[in-house]
Amino acid sequence: MEKWENNRAWFLVLPVFIIVAFSAIIPLMTVVNYSIQDIWGPGQRVFVGAEWFEEMLANERLHDALWRQFLFSGLVLLIEIPLGILIALAMPKRGWGVSAALVTLAIPLLIPWNVIGTIWIIFTRPDIGLFGVTINSLGVAFDHTARPADAWITTMAMEVWHWTPLVVLLAYAGLRAIPEAYYQAAKIDGASAWATFRYIQLPKMRGVLTIAVLLRWMDSFLIYAEPFALTGGGPGNSTTFLSIYLVKIATGQFDLGPASAFSLIYFLIILLFSFMFYQALLNVGKGEKA
Amino acid sequence: MKIRKRTIGLCIYFFLLMIPIYWMLNMSLRSNADILNAFAIYPSDLTFKNYIKGFTDHTWYSGYINSRIYVSMNTVISLLFALPAAYAFSRYKFLGDGQMFFWLLTNRMAPPAVFLLPYFQFYSTMNMIDTHIAVALAHCLFNVPLAVWILEGFMSGIPKEIDETAFIDGYSFPRFFVTIFIPLIRAGVGVTAFFCFMFSWVELLFARTLTVTEAKPIVATMTRTISATGLDWGLMAAAGILTIVPGALVIWFVRNHLAKGFALGRV
Amino acid sequence: MAQIELHKVAHSYLDHPESKADYALKHIHETWEDGGAYALLGPSGCGKTTLLNIISGLLTPSQGEVRYDGKAVTSLPPEKRNIAQVFQFPVLYDTMSVFNNLAFPLRNRGINEGEVKKRVLEVAEILDLTPFLEKRAAGLAADAKQKISLGRGLVRKDVAAILFDEPLTVIDPQLKWDLRRKLKEINEQLKLTFIYVTHDQVEALTFADRVMVMYEGELVQSGTPQELFEHPDHKFVGYFIGSPGMNFLPVTIEGNTALADAISIPLDNKTAQLGQKAEGKLELGIRPMYLEVHAESVDSGVRAAVTSVEDQGSFKIVTVRLAGNILRAKISEDQTIPQGKVWLRFPIQWTKLFADERMVK
């Protein structure tokens, strides 16, 4: 769409800019400040420059946590996005089914995250939990507190269960926003269901799917409460994702300097990849030709 | 009603979705000892103790009310600020627009713990600790960018020609925006409202840090269920069930906006 | 080729319609002959889009039958009928090039690539789209996009009728004229039936050979633009067509004259007789163009008071008051009108009588 060129549009954006800048820039400056100093206590600080950054970047355990995190977030996207789209396509468009479906989808999203982790602990226990008992009765020796693979499966199951509805809701709203005339024209043109999906629905959902991908990427990369409540990062370090590791350092050592440096690195990684996703999705639309 | 493959698939998905919820319900109706000792698909020893605690203990139900207050505040503020900004991003080209748009989203990318101390210091200085508005404003950090992004996406799906036709027909901008434009993007507004509500509702860190007693939300109260005997599983489960209700209401209210699309041609 | 017939069609959007008001379309019984350029004209909400969707098959009517060349197609979906539809907003496949957009309907029907290429190039030529074929469809201007929409209908050899739902709504005013002319050319060249829905009478009257006027779900009159202008069957047609619309004056009949309050306006004998027998509210109608305004008293003239004179360039609009009613007259730019009092003359052949909004016949 050709946009109108007008710098006075800034007035419409100004309130948002102010409120977010106020919320973000000042604290961020504080973090940058801390990240370059060594702080033992109030008033006792020494400028150390890039020392914390070097230390963090060389940290083996940080690398491990980082890889685990990439694997986790990658799996999240691979599962949740297609699944979410599929469900959204299957959802009813009219009638009482719409309300029922929407409310059902919303429920997992509304539960506080630490509660989710807590409930799933019991849920997956092989002795007293529905999931654990069922799996074990099928002959599979499942124990997420003992085996890393099981811990991963459980964490992924919890994550997909919890967050796919977000993708579904976004995709569904996006689908509903497509004017009926497009479907009518497709009918007249004799398009099959797959062609309708590929040439009308998917392109028109690009906006919401971009949001869904970015949101799930960011939020899964930052994930803390749910996996921590479920596995505590274990067994061993197998489910210690990046933010769990960060909190371990920050609370364990109570060292503001390294923790701040870590936070900044963390932030930059997310930023970099989000930017890449964003550009990629933006250009998918622009680049496609015959 | 025709039973198609997709309806069956959908029902299976919803069934799977509800199983952990059912389990939570199950737990909420049992005592802790019961939960930890025996596996039971349905509670054989039904008790409402957990719910009674939730309804009678002052900290619990006031927590409920507090949450509703600041979450509603935040949803309204976020929507109000985001709508004009999203319109600007969607319709106008201006200096720094692309960068600004992406920058907004970056505010959701930093670990929230990073902002904790500065926020606490700021609100302390302003004597706003333990107020609803403090939490509502703090949540704007992540909700406003989200709202702008989602709304912009939906707005860009409406051809600019509709705006132009309205202006030619003599509509003033506010009248056009409220009577024509917003109804067209109602699916987007509905989904944005729900997400703002949801993210604010479940947020724990800021809500707990910035409040003491007056504005203490339910999420914070729930983390206090660790007692000498360990986690109060049953109570937590009951609280979990109860926290679903307001959000379910919100989505039920916006369901029509979500499901109705955009009909070609102005009314 | 297609002769389209709507046989006693009525449609309601409600499951259980009770009264006449519940019906979006009340009683449509009409035939569109092969190859004609037709317009469906009416105000917003009169049911024209509903009617169009019933013809194209996007909507199944609650009652009645749709026939193509005598064969009932009422339950056939749109892709099985030989029609194409152009919508109010350009409806394109954004991710495809112009070529692929035009080729899409053919490829879906399994036509071989060689044939596809031939047809697409032909149609692109007709629509002046050849230089844009490799470009992304989404990047073009609104008028080009609508041409692509039209093109998707033209590429199909089996298409017999093309339906247009207010297609020029988003086009720039300067380009509207060009596009309209192009549509007319194509209609004459390819001899396809074109049914064009609009609320703009200028569009309808300049494009179509036959115009069908719709009002509140009914087809009130169908005829050539000239017929509709000179002999409106329904008050609505008189009012809607022409700018400004027809003047109406409540009257009673006495002998050979119509009386508005105490003022006599002559009628021709036949009209007067019909008027005497007619029932219901009687109104006199005359088009501003035919209403004569004189500075001095004339034979069978009536006195009226001038309220305003507007100079519209090549003509003037005089607004007068007569017996408590406002009337307008369209006069040439040279004619001068005095302030205050004038004499109006109602030429008998252009003075019509309406009973309960229908012309007396």
Image (spheres, coloured by chain):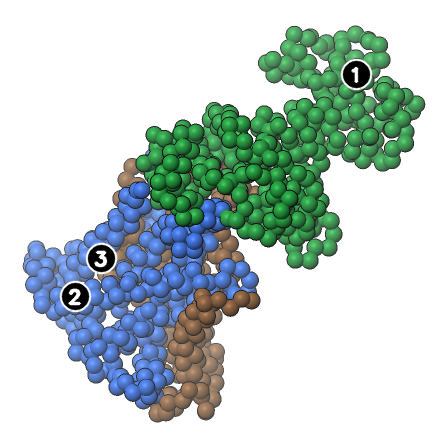
Chain colours: A blue, B brown, C green
Q: Quadrant of the C terminus of chain B?
A: top right
Figure check: A185 above or below A60: above
Q: Residue placed at 22% from the left, 77% from the top?
A: A149
- Is residue B152 or residue C339 the one in the foreground? B152
Nearer the N terminus, badge 2 or badge 3? 2
Return the residue at label 1.
Answer: C347
Residue C54 seen in the current view: yes
Which part of the image, by quadrant, shows the N terminus of chain B?
bottom right
Relative image position of residue A30 (x, y in whole percent): 20, 56
- Residue tagged by mark 3? A270
Residue holding disc 2: A67
Q: Position of residue C58 (x, y in %)?
A: 55, 49
**Other-residue count near label 3 (Cα within 10 Å), few / some / many at <14 / 14–19 / ≥20:** many
- Residue C43, image quadrant: top right
Determine the secondary structure under disc 2: helix
Q: Chain of mark 2?
A: A
The amino acid sitting under disc 2 is Trp
Amino acid tagged 3: Ile
Place of residue C294 in the rendered image (x, y in percent of width and height, measured from the top left): 76, 10
- Front position in the image: B259 or B130: B259
Q: Which mark is residue A140?
A: none
